[in-house]
């Protein structure tokens, strides 16, 4: 039974009526409905799909994880589905209240309650997007409660997902001399997304933020980047005919990094082993090619305490020693020598993989730009850092690719430069 918002019947009350008065007559159909319509919360399985098939699958983006009752303001007409069955048309301007308890999860709209394993919002007829809470999204929104959190997931086509990533992750510039770099990046984003879709997370494929790729929905799209994504449709980076493992970053600082030095789970792949990126470096045009930070000694010590490297701040910094660097120049291990009140020295080792999150920017607004830097303590008891590059350094250097694009290199050659031995293939 389907109702408009103003004529909704409480499904909870309806179920109670059926159970109370028609239990015996409808016992078998009800059981059949319960078993036959139940759906896996994973929604789809990608493990056995080929690259060609996977490119035509929807990707699932985790927009939010919430641990308390949550309200969604509907800013455009949507259709509400409960466990894959159309339950109601919801008008723009209404509010959806999701209630979670120890034993129950349900949706309330104007006092009418819906129960289900999960809910899905789809654009109303003749519309192509959903507008909620100030955001706008293509595809549909899935809302479910699992592992003590409400999960809001945007399920949409891979092409539309890439369009929502482009401007959030890559400088667009004027769109002309950056055109080939943007094309290269769109292929990178698509290949990365396929890699994450194969990981088989429960309920979703990618995070909305820097844990994967920053995604902004329709409001992040632009005319030029949408055109580019369409031009490279179904193109991915491959190695020996199979989808490659790819990463990208802002500014390599002159040499990209070997993936095995950054990501513990990755094998030592030739196309991710690091390259010299021009001499002088292509990415020298980046605003983060060189950078500096000044951190007061006490604040630096507080960050060591926060990361359980020391118990308190009752120390003074004696010196820093960089015991070893990778070929790229990035620090493998940083030795911090401290002195306590009794003039006893202790040594703290910070692994290169942890440096950026331990030290952080001077204003504590985020992690350090890179772990390729020089560091010392000055006479004013400030920690001085002078570094270059931004990001982990693995794979495609975004600012380097922009320089190569300005120099006339085509997008497939840009990708071969950063991922030696790979090939761009268009799947049908």
Image (tube, rainbow, N blue to C red):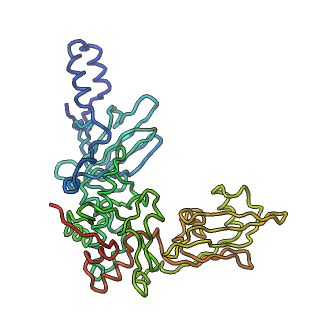
Q: Residue 377 location, x and y as percent?
A: 70, 75
x 20%, y 54%: residue: 56
In the image, residue 109 lies at what x, y percent? 34, 37
* Figure quadrant of residue 279: bottom left
**Numbered label tally:** 0
22 lies above or below 232: above
> Which residue is depicted at the point 28% across and 59% down?
161
**Residue 384: quarter of image:** bottom right
In the image, 260: left or right of 305? left
Residue drawn 41% across the image and 59% down it: 266
Specify whether 413 is left or right of 274.
left
Residue placed at 19% from the left, 30% from the top?
1
Q: Name the foreground residue: 234 vs 99.
A: 234
Find the residue positioned furthest to the left.
428
Spot occupied by residue 332 in the image (x, y as percentages of width and height): 56, 68
259 relative position to 77: left or right: right
Up/down of 85 relative to 166, above or below: above
Q: Quadrant of the C terminus?
A: bottom left
- The furthest residue to the right: 342
**Residue 290 % position (x, y):** 51, 81
């Amino acid at each position: 039974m389907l109702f408009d918002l103003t004529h909704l019947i409480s499904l909870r009350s309806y179920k109670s009526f059926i159970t109370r008065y028609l239990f015996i007559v409808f016992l078998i159909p009800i059981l059949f409905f319960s078993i036959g319509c139940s759906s896996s919360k994973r929604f789809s399985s990608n493990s056995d799909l080929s690259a060609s098939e996977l490119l035509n699958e929807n990707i699932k983006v985790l927009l939010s994880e919430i641990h308390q009752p949550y309200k969604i303001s509907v800013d455009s007409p949507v259709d509400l589905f409960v466990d894959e069955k159309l339950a109601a048309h919801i008008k723009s301007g209404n509010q959806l209240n999701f209630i979670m308890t120890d034993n129950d999860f349900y949706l309330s709209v104007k006092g009418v309650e819906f129960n289900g394993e999960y809910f899905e919002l789809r654009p109303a007829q003749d519309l192509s997007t959903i507008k909620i809470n100030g955001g706008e999204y293509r595809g549909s929104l899935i809302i479910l409660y699992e592992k003590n959190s409400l999960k809001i997931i945007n399920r949409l086509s891979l092409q539309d997902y890439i369009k929502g990533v482009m401007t959030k992750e890559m400088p667009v510039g004027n769109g002309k001399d950056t055109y080939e770099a943007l094309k290269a990046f769109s292929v990178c984003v698509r290949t990365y997304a396929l890699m994450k879709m194969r990981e088989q997370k429960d309920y979703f494929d990618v995070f909305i933020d820097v844990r994967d790729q920053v995604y902004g929905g329709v409001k992040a799209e632009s005319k030029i980047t949408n055109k580019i994504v369409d031009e490279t449709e179904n193109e991915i980076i491959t190695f020996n005919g199979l989808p490659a493992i790819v990463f990208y970053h802002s500014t390599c600082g002159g040499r990209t990094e070997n993936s095995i030095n950054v990501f513990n789970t990755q094998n030592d792949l030739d196309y991710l082993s690091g390259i010299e990126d021009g001499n002088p470096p292509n990415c020298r045009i980046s605003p983060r090619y060189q950078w500096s930070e000044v951190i007061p000694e006490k604040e630096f010590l507080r960050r060591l305490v926060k990361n359980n490297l020391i118990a308190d701040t009752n120390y003074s910094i004696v010196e820093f020693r960089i015991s070893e660097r990778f070929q790229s120049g990035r620090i493998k291990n940083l030795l911090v020598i401290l002195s306590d009140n009794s003039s006893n020295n202790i040594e703290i080792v910070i692994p290169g993989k942890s440096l950026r999150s331990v030290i952080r920017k001077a204003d504590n607004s985020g992690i350090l730009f890179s772990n390729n830097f020089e560091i010392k303590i000055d006479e004013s008891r400030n920690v001085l850092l002078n570094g270059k590059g931004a990001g982990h350094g693995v794979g495609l250097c975004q600012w380097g690719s922009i320089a190569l694009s300005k120099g006339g290199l085509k997008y497939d050659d840009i990708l071969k430069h950063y991922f030696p031995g790979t090939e761009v293939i268009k799947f049908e």
